[in-house]
Amino acid sequence: MFIRDDVYADYLRFLNGRTVMEVDSFSSDYIRRDVVDMILVQKALILGGFNKSFEYQVGNVNFRNTKLLEQGKLLLSFDSYWLADAQPLQHALFISDPVIRQGEYYAGLYHSPDNTKVTALSGFDALKELSAVSTPRWRTDWDTLQKLPLKSHVIEHEWIAQARMVSMQWVDFMLMPLMPDKKNEYILEGIHLIAHPKWVVLLDGSRHFVVSKRHPDGERAFAALQIGLAKLRALGQIKRAYEQAGFAPDWSKMQVLKPAH
């Protein structure tokens, strides 16, 4: 399995020697949406009767994963996909039931701590002074940004490059999941980003796991995944995992960034 290096580091810190089946609480300094995904998909596979172990290869992984899945060289992705990104690949991928359902995903506006233009953001109309970065390859993210009245929409396909551009203030902000246990702060390799303390944006889509149809174990793994996800959903563990991870905004402090009318 190919895993982004920062995600894998937080995954190991969060587990702290435990197996994924021993995890029953997702409150931790090292938890984030990517780590919740990793643990839930493995739990679901085991609950569904798929017990093969995985080997991890760490690096700056992005769209290479999708190509390997299409080719059948990678069994599944531990990182969930937006439905809008998965559907065009249905010829090569099985798409699971949603782990994050439509209307449940709110993203923070992450920016450099020194970017006073973003920290001073007063509302929807003030976005016309700001720029944001993403890629059209992430359809839900890109469509969301297109609906915001920004000064410019900057295209960069690599996630780490996006984060670096925002940290350097070449672009004002990017959309990322909230990480309240880390004080909504992201630090890695000279990159330092924080989320706006007030504003969040609804990403209007659902997220799903994908399994390669062309991998020898694909059909069996997908069947097990669906069984396991149904069990986890019935127990309330999926919703609780993302809530405990701080995925839902603190509505006593935050508001959805949208037009006044």
Image (cartoon, grey):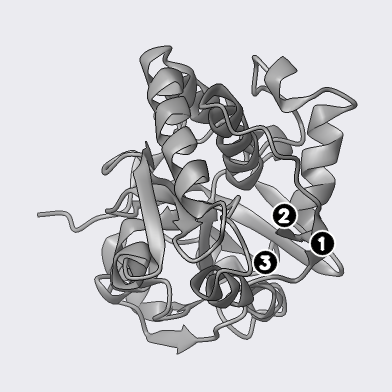
Which label was assigned to residue 186? 2
Q: Secondary structure at mark 2?
A: strand
Q: Which residue is nearer to you in this view: 142 or 21?
A: 21
Please state which amino acid type lies under the numbered disc 3: Ser
Position of residue 82 measured from the top left corner of the image (x, y, whole percent)? 38, 58
**Screen quadrant of the N terminus:** bottom right
Disc 2 versus disc 3: distance between alpha carbons?
10 Å
Please state which amino acid type lies under the numbered disc 1: Gln
Please state which amino acid type lies under the numbered disc 2: Tyr
Position of residue 180 measured from the top left corner of the image (x, y, whole percent)? 62, 36
The numbered mark, 2 or 1, whose residue comes first in the sequence reads 1
Residue 145 sits above or below residue 135 on the image: above
Q: Residue furthest left?
A: 261
Residue drawn 52% across and 68% down? Answer: 174
Q: Secondary structure at mark 3?
A: loop
Q: Are marks 2 and 1 in contact (CB under 8 Å)?
A: no
Residue drawn 57% across and 60% down? Answer: 110
In the image, taking residue 221 as reference, residue 59 lies left or right, namely right
Single out the mark in the foreground, 2 or 3: 2
Q: Which residue is nearer to you in this view: 219 or 58?
A: 219
Position of residue 208 measured from the top left corner of the image (x, y, whole percent)? 40, 48
In the image, taking residue 221 as reference, residue 102 lies left or right, namely left
Which label was assigned to residue 112? 3
Disc 2 versus disc 1: distance between alpha carbons?
22 Å
Q: Secondary structure at mark 1?
A: strand
**Screen quadrant of the C terminus:** bottom left
Label 1 CA crowd tier, 10 Å (few <14, some 14–19, many 20+): few
Q: How many marks?
A: 3
Label 2 CA crowd tier, 10 Å (few <14, some 14–19, many 20+): some
Which label was assigned to residue 57? 1
Disc 3 versus disc 1: distance between alpha carbons?
30 Å
